[in-house]
Image (tube, rainbow, N blue to C red):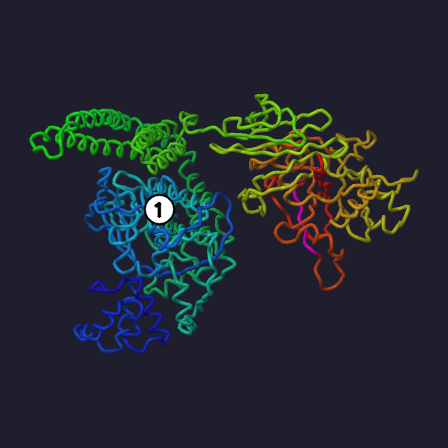
Amino acid sequence: MARGLIEPNALWDMACRWTLGGASTPQELFEGILTPEQLAALPELLAQEGRSPPAARALAPQLDDLDALRFDTQREIDLPGEEVVADFPTLATSATRAVNAGGSRYEVGEALGAGGAGKVVKARDREIGRVVALKTLKPGAEADSAVGNRFLTEARITAQLEHPNIIPVYDLGTLPNGQPYYSMRVVKRQSLQNVLTNPELRKQWPLVRLIGAFVQISRALAYAHRRGVAHRDIKPENVLLGDYGEVYLGDWGNAKLLSRAEVSEPIAIDPSGQDFGRKRHEAVASALSGTPGYIAPEQIRGDQKRIDHRADIFALGVVLYEILTGEHPFDAPTVLAVILATQTRDPKPPRSISPSCPLLLEDLCLAMLAKDPDQRPPTADRVAAEAEAFLEGAKERMRRREEAIKLCELAKAPLERDRRLDSERERLVEEARRLLKDVKEYEPIERKRAGWQLEDRAAGVEREQARAAAEAIDLYTKALAYDPDLVEARAGLADLYWSRAVRADQEHQHAARIYHEALVAEFDVGRYAALLTADAVLSVDSSPSGASVLAYRYVEKDRILVASDERALGRTPLREVHLKPGSYLFVLKRAGYRDVRYPLLLKRGTHHRVEVNLYTDAEIGEGFVYIPGGTFIAGGDAQAYDPLRRAELHVPDVAIAKFPVTFREYCEFLNELELRDLDLALKRAPHGTRGSEGYVARPASGGGWEPLPTVVEGDAQKRFPAEEGHLWNLPVILIDWFDAVAYCRFRSERDGIEVRLPTELEWEKASRGTDGRFYPWGDHFDPTFCLMRSSRPFLAQPEPVGTFPIDTSPYGVRDMAGGVREWVADVNGEKSWVETSREIESTADAGSDAPPWRIARSGSWAADSQQCRSASRTRFFGITRALNLSFRIAKPLSRGPGR
């Protein structure tokens, strides 16, 4: 190491070989780490150092100081949200497609850092006069295609993470010597580790300021997770603090595309330490990636089923612990001891070390450090929200706001100076251009000096402008740390970043423009929304054609999305109608056909091509609502129970019942069954337990089945008197999945059409439309919007269908958030409707085979708001009966030939 021949990380690989007995000579120990030339010279080097051949054993003490033990989880994780584009080319193909740096693009300066196979140097971009950080591979590393491809993957991952707290990548290409590179912003290498270990620096960073930085890093991590990227090496050294108060989560060299992960051979570490040395060297070497003390317990155990983005949250918890206490939660004298402590030792409560630690932050920190990932906060956004709760505490809110306003007042001067200097810079540049435009290249310096002087002055003004902007950013950022919603600070940052976006656009610096526009959107308080929004384009075809099309834009009113601002677009076929991006409801009308409600999320700059089939009332059926085919945003709601993974999925035409099946409809089914088989009717009748007397429907004295008056009791019975017929309009309850399927067969036979339960995707699309809203009516919840456990001042009970008019989907389907839970046909991604329909009905005592699982959707009169979210899913045995469990029916639709 002293000679610079090996990196600290390589010590671990060497130690594994020595510990496992995999190397008997120095050459074997260093094989794959040193070059062939270095291996040949190794005996002489060892002789010079006075080392004997078993020198590998002398390396063991150095492990105590090792700071980068890698542990590669490589666990595939399923996360919602937009993913980073993962179709990366290899090094060979990228080398031909990357921008060639040429012989004069970059003037390389001092080294900024090095690690692993890469190094970072300061460089000047001659084309635009900007100083950048240039990351390249070390000499010889590009020969390893795997190393080169990982380098390109790192660059492309980082480039796609456009976030205020992630260092932006400017350019990617190859140097004249064939080395791949990418350039990025130069950030002062002062890290959170420097602040935590330097008493003088620590005085400049009180807890409130540190937590403000922690929140920003948590948001950056949450953004990366939503894009499908895990950082995998979070630690104070990788939290970078810029020259002017910026906060960055850096070093994404170990990042992993979660959707592309490959499962590696797991490795377990016995807490006793006795079996660690018995693992094969290859397994250890291939599985290690990370930093000791920040690697989550499930990673160390190789518990592949438990490893996901929450391993990053564990590492973030270690960072928070160090912020709160100044100590490491798993401090130990050796690397292995640190790893074992991470697995087996609970950290001391932060308040036992630092009594002034706020309780809220202590609880958050200990939750993040839970050994069981299920006990940790589920997302980094949740972590940030909890940390912000501390910053926004009632006792400190006023003080923080006052401090934030003071900082914003201080920011006005550098912001005004930035604007003035920008005008001065442009004037000097233009004047220099005017003076030099007629000067020939071969003319003497005397002819050029005046223009050069103006250019130098312009460069000096630009530096002063950068300092002014940095000062303003620092003050506004500090203000937002005190009050994240302060309009003055957000507007000031938006103004500043907008000026940079305009300048970048003028200079054709597209990456910089995109980056600064993203920052504008991040901090905008409404001033730039229109400037950042491009039109969406819509084309519509219908079968048959000639349908008139009305457009309604969804706007929020009283926390409900309301279709408003009617606009007639013309008749189909429509071609390239320009509309503002947003969520719309389109209504298609044609004589002889039922009106079609077609919700659609129009995206900025996207051409949406829509094809709609029209059906008659007879084809759709009385009591059914038409859900036209097309794509919709499924899943992806982190607050829902067991949601599907976020995806845009296609669902064909289908008709779904407007309401769940009522007692009136189900009793017709029982009446028909009783005529054929009384025992079968009793089996299918709604009741608590098979064979019990807990029925909620009975044969009436005058013939036929009827609901019992006791289905609703107390105040609910007073509100919905049985004598007024309300019981008949209650959704049928205490129905298992097989009863629901039997009812569908009855309706199919009676009505001469195919009737079945809706699939999960059909149900979810019918509930939330296409724009990914959380509830049928929008994104906000109130107990008065649907029937759930807090909707009434009295004890919640079933109520007649349609009682809550707000609980209506964009298509017009009712009661899909509250009322009753509803059986669906399939288990998405596991069992199709065809497969579930073939499964034999079983009972709880039918033997060792467990009854099959089924899915129920919707909330219910007994549910909380989380269950009412359209993406929520609940698993039940198919034979489950419950007082809030029911179903609705669906029928497939298809356009016949010749129509």
Judged by its main secondary structure, the magenta piece is strand
**Front residue of 9 and 322:** 9
Find residue 561 and report its horizontal and vertical position in percent: 57, 28
**Residue 406 sits above or below residue 188 on the image:** above
* Residue 854 colored in magenta in the image: yes
Confirm whether residue 116 shows in the render. no
Q: Which of these two is toward me, 71 or 104?
A: 104
Residue 291 x, y percent position in the rendering: 36, 58
Q: Amino acid at mark 1?
A: Leu
Q: Which residue is located at x 21 percent, y 75 percent?
A: 43
Q: Residue furthest right?
A: 702
- Quadrant (top left/top right/bottom left/bottom right) for the C terminus: top right
- Residue pictured at 55% horizontal, 42% vertical: 648
Asked if the magenta segment contains residue 857, the reply would be: yes
Q: Which residues are magenta?
A: 852-859
Q: For label 1, count other residues whose C-alpha is less than 10 Å away and answer few (under 14), some (14-19) or many (20+).
A: many
- Is 630 situated left or right of 406 in this image? right
Instruction: Provide the residue designation for mark 1.
Output: 249
Q: What is the quadrant of residue 457 in the picture?
A: top left
Against 110, residue 418 (above or below) is above
- Secondary structure of residue under mark 1: strand
The answer to which image quadrant residue 654 occupies is top right
Q: Is residue 365 left or right of residue 51?
A: right
Horizontal side, residue 18 vs residue 888: left or right: left
Residue 104 appears at what percent x and percent y? 21, 45
Question: Does residue 665 show up?
Answer: yes
Quarter of the picture containing the N terminus is: bottom left
